[in-house]
Amino acid sequence: MKINAVNMTEKEYLLPGNRTCPGCALSLAYRHILKALEGQVIVTVPASCLTVLHGMYPVTSVTVPCVNTPFATTAASATGLVAGLKVLGKEGLTVLAIAGDGGTHDIGIQALSAAAERQTDFLYICYDNEGYMNTGNQRSGSTPLGAISGTTPILGKQQNQKDITAIMEAHGIPYVATANASYPLDLYEKVRKARTIRGTKFIHVFVPCSPGWGFPFSDTIKIGKLAVETGWVILYEVEDGVFRLTAASESIAKRGSLRPLREYLMEQGRFKNITEEQINELQGWVNTRWKRCLDRAVNN
Amino acid sequence: MARKASIWILDGNRAAAQGVKLSRVQVIAAYPITPQSPVTEKLSEFVEGKELDAQYIAVESEHSALAVCTSASMVGARTFTATSSHGLAYMHEMLHWAAGARLPLVLACVNRAIGAPWNVLNDQQDSISQRDTGWIQIYARNNQEIIDSIIQAYKIAESIYVPVMVCYDGYVLSHTEMPVDVPAQEDVDRFLPPYKPHTILDPANPKNYNLVTLANPRVNAEGVLCHGYMELRYLLQEALQNSRETITTVGREFGELFGRSYANMFWENRLDDADVVIVAMGSLAMEAMVAADILREAGHKVGVLGLRVFRPFPKADVAKALKKSRLVVVFDKNISYGLEGATCSEIKSALYGNSVRAVIRNFIVGLGGRDVKARELVDAVNKSLLSLKEGDLNEEYPEWICAI
């Protein structure tokens, strides 16, 4: 059954009211992730914005079991949860490791790579707000070229982000996907699918950050959509090596035109000092990646 | 006494592995490092050979090893890891986390020097550097104590929800074979009941562990005032302060079942009439007993206090044991740079306010695997006896038994 806003479960696992900033895309994405897992989950979370969302002792905003774990250890913690559940004969639960881009691209990549290589049976979700937003917007391995951040305050970042989904795909795991908080049904379906697959599953979720990126908090959904329409984010999944475009990226592929990346960049204060040369470089990066995806996709 | 002895010839690492197997550990995560590697090889052999029903996770780092153990413990599994030196240092963050989360993990530290420069041989700088992480630290003098301590460690840890580090000297014990009385599985099962977790992750009763916790107490949704961060830290300190009772009770129970009692926090050797006491920890305490023999032959009343439990430090017991001493000579295989050996500091702290006016001398020995001979310990005691006549209670810094 195709999921839509009407037939999606009404049950909420994220309680109303949490400590995230206004317009937080993570809050929206996390709500749908938990719905897709129907409460049959144990979550492990490193230091990140999600820690803030989860609340402060003795009050929490989630109704699923959760363990907080040090920054570098998300995937190792998940490994421990999986091993413990297995040895105790507890079946039917998804172990969800969910970390930001700092916790994934940077400090957590060693543990994540190793857990994937060991074919640990868990779902890893990286919610990517392209910087260390919880600590006040410092640059990460996912911050784009030209973006101003707390640690690239004048010149903007001089390097582009790494493609974490491609890195994870190179581990030969059975399922990788990209998603975006502005497309919650696509995200929901990908989590539902990942839940049924054994082995390591990786989903990259793009979550625009209003205070970090410098756009009005009422524009979160719009920015997320612009990211897809300009090809900064491409929605796809790779299941057992088969690459499929999904949601809006699939439609754009069929219609055949991305909007200029400039339209996405100009909406955000973090790109206020970006140079023409950098914009061209980023546009080139987007074009190359888009072409590669079109070539690979079985459904364009 | 449960049964007759079953003597095996084991090196320290294999003794540790046997202790882990007998404790029916369920999740093992480890990363190889010299001289710990044979422990993990042996354990993976037990698991692959189906001698031990456990999950063995070959992680990519020690940091991850302990992260696997903490999370596995939180779903209710009994866990084990082992490491040495740089591996233990790399675990530092997770050591704090495990103790802070009150998880009853057991870790074997095969004591090794730490770089730079590289050195794979024995001293105790690695575990001493982790003394403030909230773990109980037990040091073994020989391979029998390794296997016995690991089995006891689970019972101690799971009684009070404080993790336990069992430390034994690299090579000196880890790679040296000696006779070990290996307990029977049914006896260990009688001694050590299955792990009953106090925290558990279960969707039927969702809880969120180790959330951000503010300094001050705070009310929950029902209006009940709950602990702040500082109260949680107090409770960990209280657990360690009170753990002496558990450690000695478990040690006594072990003795009743297996004939080897661990009812004391340290080993006493001829302290009854001694006015000169040698203090040492780990295998060095065995060497100290040889030195004491030589000194006794020369007419000195020498005894040995072999530290077994370093954290919690048994201050009151130590002060009582050293009450009659005129001279205490402390040998440390570690150095707190800028001060002195760590065990010497603890001994001094134990004696303060206890009207013991012993001369205390500290010698740093055996760093990076430097051989420590009984004769050198004897010379150090003789030298200290000379300074006894001069009446200096204390010297500012320790002496080093080395070429400088």
Image (cartoon, coloured by chain):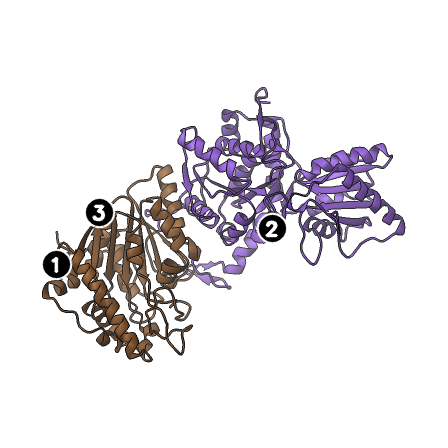
Chain colours: A brown, B purple
Instruction: State left or right for residue B333 relative to residue B77.
Output: right
Q: Secondary structure at mark 1?
A: loop
Front label number (2 vs 3):
3
Label 2: chain?
B
Amino acid tagged 1? Asn
Q: Where does the image place residue A95, in percent across and percent down from the top left?
A: 32, 48
How would you rate the neighbour count of disc 2 (Cα within 10 Å): few for under 14, some for 14-19, many for 20 or more? Answer: some
Front label number (2 vs 1):
1
Q: Secondary structure at mark 3?
A: loop
Q: Please tell me in which quadrant of the rendered image residue A143 appears.
A: bottom left
Q: CA distance from mark 1 to mark 3?
A: 18 Å
The numbered mark at residue B348 is: none
The numbered mark at residue B131 is: 2
Counting residues from the start of the chain, the first of labels 1 and 3 encountered is: 3
**Residue tagged 1:** A300
Q: Are the residues flagged by discs 2 and 3 from a single subunit? A: no
Residue closest to the eye, B80 or B244: B80
Q: Secondary structure at mark 2?
A: helix
Marks 1,3: beta carbons within 8 A:
no
Amino acid tagged 3? Asp
Q: Please tell me in which quadrant of the rendered image residue B293 appears.
A: top right
**Residue tagged 3:** A240
Question: Can the viewer see residue B221?
Answer: no
